[in-house]
Amino acid sequence: MFSGDVVLKQVAGRQMSAGDVADADLLLVRSITQVDAALLDAAKHLKMVGTATIGTDHLDKDYLTSRSIPFFNAPGCNADAVVEYDLAVLFNLFEERGESLLDKTVGVVGVGNVGGRLCQRLEALGVKVLKNDPPRHAAGESGFIALDEVFAQADVICLHTPLVKTGQWPSYHLVGEAELERLKLGAVLLNAGRGPVIDNQALLGFLQQRTDVTAILDVWEHEPQVDATLAARVHIATPHIAGYSLDGKLRGTHMLRQAAATVLDAPQPPDLSEFLPVAAVNAVTVSDDVTISALINMVYDPLHDDRRMRKTLVCDDQPVRFDLLRKQYPVRREFASLRVIGLRDRALREQLRAIGFSVDLA
Ligand SMILES: NC(=O)C1=CN([C@@H]2O[C@H](COP(=O)(O)OP(=O)(O)OC[C@H]3O[C@@H](n4cnc5c(N)ncnc54)[C@H](O)[C@@H]3O)[C@@H](O)[C@H]2O)C=CC1
Ligand SMILES: O=C(O)C(=O)[C@H](O)COP(=O)(O)O
């Protein structure tokens, strides 16, 4: 996406050093590169910093502001991918148990791009949703309840807050012993936000006692290091890939390309649709016997990611392998890339549309 007269210098995200960026005009990173004074003090021509991610906890924003360096993230770029990770995990889990997600009460903590879209899709399915988002509540928006109430009432809790360590609503260790103790019998706790939002040691101690609770973790405290004892107690363990759809990655890069064009006063790039390929499997004809999880698994089966990650947990170089799983992640598309054809059952057609599939009668 970046071409023409641009001189590109690629550096591995965890290895980037001050010398690598000293002469840079633009710095484009992902979540594993800490962007702070140590990296940037020597970079005197920097016109912008961009991260092709939603999260910004790796950027020292105060420092960037003090240097008047504009910085951009890519809000919403991979939100649909994270929502679809949640849906894939939950539809599979409840099918395995002979239950239905549609009968559950789902608590969503952090109702932004990811949490908000998750609520929309669940509500369109008729699922009861409880929402917690103190910053939005304080801004005067309605429909939110306290975290304690979410933990006490929900069958499933999905965490989608940013990692914030200071200010009025810190999310670091937002979920500790006290919150875990409130979980209902048989509850499901899913974290696809940032690892340290849950106190991982407290979670391990809790799961050792409360074997009725199901934990699903895409993000871990101290990534890329993963606590193998905790992972062994977790039902689905994945290497921070909830947002890793091809669509999401391209959207993020495209948003930075647009920001760079604005900062450099250069022409805007072509529309994103010019870069997004048609999915390898883009249409399927099914009968009314098809299940929602079968269709979801055709696009994305989270168990593949779980199996790949578990193989790495016994390796001496586990952290290196965690990064490799992410770097070599296979092409994954979003639900909207699959056109589902042939369903006569109108209710099922509506449910599939509600969770994001393209649905046609013929
Ligand atoms: N696992 C993965 O692959 C991915 C993880 N993420 C993580 O998920 C986070 C959320 O993503 P978005 O929804 O796009 O961000 P967002 O900024 O659109 O929404 C975050 C929401 O959380 C709320 N919030 C902030 N502090 C809170 C607190 N203490 N308690 C409850 N709610 C709080 C905010 O008011 C906001 O509505 C990102 O910051 C990122 O860290 C995002 C994408 C992919
Ligand atoms: O967007 C975010 O925030 C995420 O967590 C991304 O999915 C992280 O991806 P990487 O930047 O670590 O590749």
Image (cartoon, rainbow, N blue to C red):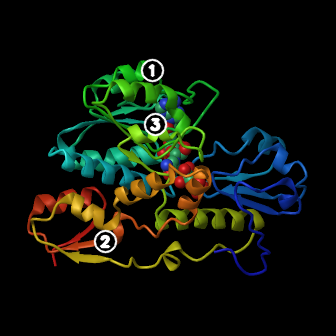
Give coordinates of residue 177: x percent, y percent: 45, 20
Q: Earlier in the sequence, mark 2 or mark 3?
A: 3
Alpha-carbon distance for marks 2 and 3? 35 Å
Q: Measuring 36% from the left and 47% from the top, which residue is drawn there?
A: 118
Alpha carbon distance from label 3 to label 1 = 15 Å
Taking the image as shown, residue 338 lies to the left or right of residue 170, namely left
- Name the one closer to the observer, 8 or 210: 210
What residue is drawn where x is 35% and y is 23%? 209
Count of numbered circles on the image: 3
N-terminal-most mark, 3 or 1: 1
Q: Residues within 10 Å of mark 2 (few under 14, many from 20)?
A: many
**Tag shown at residue 338:** 2
User: Is disc 3 surrounded by few (<14), some (14 to 19) or many (20+) residues within 10 Å?
Assistant: some
Q: Which residue is mark 3?
A: 230
Judged from the image, the secondary structure of the residue bearing numbered disc 1 is helix
Pointer 1: what residue?
A: 177
Name which residue type carries label 1.
Glu
- Answer whether labels 3 and 1 touch (C-beta < 8 Å): no
Amino acid at the residue labelled 3: Leu
Left or right of 273, for residue 337: left
Q: Nearer the viewer, mark 2 or mark 3?
A: 3
